[in-house]
Image: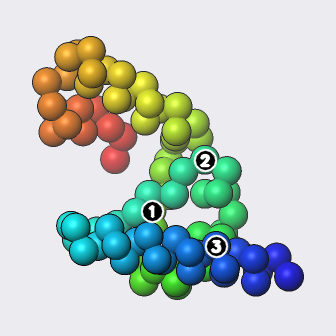
Amino acid sequence: MTRVVLEGVAYSLRAVFDVMQELAPIYQLIATSGASRSALWLQIITDVLGINLAKPIIAEDAAYGAALLALLSCDVYPNLETLFQILPA
């Protein structure tokens, strides 16, 4: 039953993904927060979307991303390219 629900949600994501692909090509997605902790969920999304799904190496990834955007908006870093240079590999 759980897998069926997850697959249903994944196909709903696929509808949104297809619209986004029309605007600009998407080559990779990054799974964050609680959902990224489930190998089954990540595999279902990868299978349904047919795209590489990366998992961050930072445990508190959403908070980290928010902090990076705050640094960018406060002009600590002039642009995304410069900001990306501080990210762990």
Q: CA distance from mark 1 to mark 2?
A: 12 Å
| Circle 1 residues within 10 Å: few <14, some 14–19, many ≥20 | some
Q: Earlier in the sequence, mark 1 or mark 3?
A: 3
Residue lying at the far right in this picture: please name it: 1
Residue at the location (51% across, 57% down)? 31
Q: Which residue is mark 2?
A: 33
| Circle 3 residues within 10 Å: few <14, some 14–19, many ≥20 | few
Q: Which residue is mark 3?
A: 9
Q: Nearer the viewer, mark 1 or mark 3?
A: 3
Q: Is residue 82 above or below residue 70?
A: below
Q: Position of residue 88 (x, y in %)?
A: 36, 40
Q: Amino acid at mark 1?
A: Ala
Report helix, strand or loop for mark 2: helix
Q: Nearer the viewer, mark 1 or mark 2?
A: 2
Q: Which residue is mark 1?
A: 54
Q: Is residue 66 visible?
A: yes
From the viewer's perspective, tell me whether residue 11 is left or right of residue 21.
Answer: right
Q: CA distance from mark 1 to mark 3?
A: 19 Å
Residue at the location (66% across, 81% down)? 7
Q: Is residue 29 above or below residue 51?
A: above
Considering the image in quadrants, where does the N terminus appear? Answer: bottom right
Q: Nearer the viewer, mark 2 or mark 3?
A: 3
Q: Is residue 88 above or below residue 51?
A: above
Q: Amino acid at mark 2?
A: Ser
Q: Earlier in the sequence, mark 2 or mark 3?
A: 3
Q: Is residue 87 above or below residue 4?
A: above
Q: Any mark on residue 26, and which?
A: none
Count of marks placed on residues: 3
Q: Amino acid at mark 3?
A: Val
Q: Are marks 1 and 2 in contact (CB under 8 Å)?
A: no
